[in-house]
Amino acid sequence: MNAPVPHQTLVTPEKPKALASGQFKVTARDVDVYYGDKQAIKSLSIDIPDRSVSAFIGPSGCGKSTFLRCINRMNDTIPACRVTGDITVDGNDIYDPNIDVVQLRAKVGMVFQKPNPFPKPIYENVAYGPRIHGLARDKTELDQIVEKSLRKAGLWEEVKDRLQNPGTGLSGGQQQRLCIARAIAVNPEVILMDEPCSALDPIATARIEELIDELRQNYCIVIVTHSMQQAARVSQLTAFFHLGTLVEYGDTDEMFTAPQEKRTQDYITGRFG
Amino acid sequence: MTELRSELIAKRYRAERRFRFYGATALAVTAAFLAVLLVSIVWQGLPAFLEKKIQLEVTVDPAAVDAANPVAGDYDKLLREGLRTLFPEASSRVLRKALNGLISTGGSDDLRSRVVADPSLIGKTLTVPALLSDDADLYLKGQQTGVTRAPGASAIQIAPLEGEEGFLITGDTPEKSPEALPGQLVQAGAVNLRITAAKPGYVTAEALTPMEPAMQQLAAGQWQLVTLSVPEQDRRISDVQALWLEKLKAEGRVETGFNWRFFTAGDSREAELAGVRGALVGSLLTVAVALAFALPLGVAAAIYLEQFAPKNRFTDLIEVNINNLAAVPSIIFGLLGLAVFLNFFGLPRSAPLVGGLVLALLVLPTIIIASRAALKAVPQSITEAALGVGASKQQAVFQHVLPLALPGIMTGTILGLARAFGETAPLLMIGMVAFIADIPSGFTSAATALPVQVFLWSDLPEAAFKSKTAAAIIVLLVVLFALNAAAIYLRKRFERRW
């Protein structure tokens, strides 16, 4: 799957602005996902560019989270889940039997819907990933990684004096930023976020959205959200999913002002969903 | 319409009140049963934690104790002699036997240890405590018969009956006959009499110990009337023994101490010498073996089933069978142990090793079920978080899920061990039910376990073993409560809410 992506396979016929830049981090071709007998995703193809935020929107059960979890093979943990088709990250087929899932997940980090810090000290939460991947040669280097990650996640100033306090003792928004710091700490290239703000209040949400915008400079970010406003605020590209299919994918601005598809329009104007 | 509704509401409230009442009643009945059980056990068992000794002056005769080898001396004989000097009236063989029966066969231990520690005592006279026999002990604890002692209210004369056995007791004056009933005992110094008949103006009595045929005058207060509520044939201590014990008590020779022996001695045929140390050590060794086998196996099985095993019909079958195993009667495990460990593998009988293996099988399902529940209680999000930063499944399980499940696993394990600790039936099958006086020294030496000891003692006819049984039950309950308390503490201490 190293061949360049032909744009005509995209659902949106015209070449969106963000997509025009050419460099695609994640690509998918004809992906079908089944949970047992039930098909959750039908023949999905998408190209996600690097250093941008792509938002997946759509009603509940439309398959957006399922597809997100395919990108770092998190669905492997669900025994009944079966994925066919091709998904590549940096041109490498991630469902290739030779691929190391552990390395893939280090490269494609994930932030979950509910903040899920380990019930361990803040420091240990961030240091865990670098430690198991051997990213730090010594304690000093590990300290640097932890500080750098926490700074990038905008949490350093708030927790630098209590790194040994349990991560579960932080507020919801802080916990989610800690989870982002934990994901950043292993130097990922893609960060998947599964409704990262759905359990947070508006102020914490705003803080995370700011953070996502900053992280865009260095990472390919894919975010699943139920909030159209959030998608409009943070993303450059938006993909609308419905009933397991990708209905429309394109520049966020265009998507929210002039959607191509009737279903997209109905959804973003609140007619269903 | 409105009325109908209010009637329905009233009915609903009545039903709720009724239900609350049922619940409270059930609780009260349960609590009452539990209270009765505990009170009766404690009531019966507490006396066994005390022991009675008498202070005797003993002359350490160099003829009986060799200074070169003081351990081998005949200290029982010295003790008996010391006792006889107090009761010279015990002149016949039968009486001497009755007298000697007051002292335990292990009564000379104190004397022996003192002489062995200090051989210069040989030839000297010393005062030592001597452990009383179980019957004398029970008598002094008031568990054989009720005793009332009344000092003689008036002066009496004791004279031999003319022409027949027995004595005539009359008051000072012919009108003042002593108030006594047949069966009551009269004691004054070396005089031990039992009233045989009460007639107007006089009573007749028989001598329990030989006495001078001469007439004796006793002033009021010089003698006492002893009444034992239980007839002689229904108790294990005779009238004369009771009188002797009363005299020892009156002289202040009886002392009560804490029965340390109960915790330091193994089993014995003599109730006063029997202790739970052997059974306790046997239980601990057995449970240690059970823990060593059941914990790693159980936790490993639980981790595999919960985290790694594919969900298919085979694992479903295993799961169902593990749940069923938890309900298998424990004696079946005993039979299994007999067939497999003893007959097939030829492991030693009555050994804590085998007992522990059997109990490990018994608690394995409990530990697996509890561990699986604890592992399942750790939210999936923790596993996902670990996997999300690139941990392998094994790292996620061992570095994140298992530590979080550990308090639950420990709680389940402790409760399983508490069950193992209280198990009797499977141990019977593998021969841990024998009379074993020695404290087990290792995992393969013959041993018994605490609940089995309770079972063994409860079977013995001696009254003293009744309270020993209850005392052993108390020890068992204390251990079990401690284990449960530890489980509750662990649960409270490390409980985590998600």
Image (cartoon, rainbow, N blue to C red):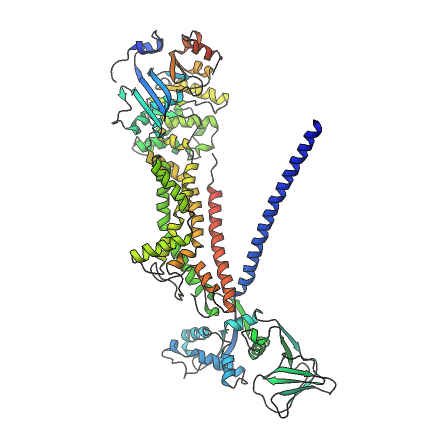
Of all residues shown, which one is farthest toward the bottom? B163
- Please provide percent x and percent y for residue B479: 47, 55
Location of residue A152 by image quarter = top left
Which residue appears at 30% of the width and 28% of the height? A101
Q: Quadrant of the N terminus of chain A?
A: top left
- Please provide percent x and percent y for residue B185: 62, 79
Total numbered labels placed on residues in the image = 0
- Please provide percent x and percent y for residue A85: 30, 20
Please determine whether, in this image, residue B41 is positioned above or below residue B17: below
Res B188 visible: no
- Please provide percent x and percent y for residue A32: 33, 20
**Front residue (pair B271, A205):** B271
Which residue appears at 43% of the width and 19% of the height? A225
Decide if residue B10 is on the left or right side of residue B368. right
Decide if residue B262 is on the left or right side of residue A22. right
Location of residue A234 by image quarter = top left
**Front residue (pair A204, B215):** B215
Res B484 visible: yes
Please determine whether, in this image, residue B33 is positioned above or below residue A167: below
**Front residue (pair A164, B275):** B275
Please determine whether, in this image, residue B5 is positioned above or below residue B286: above
Location of residue A132 by image quarter = top left
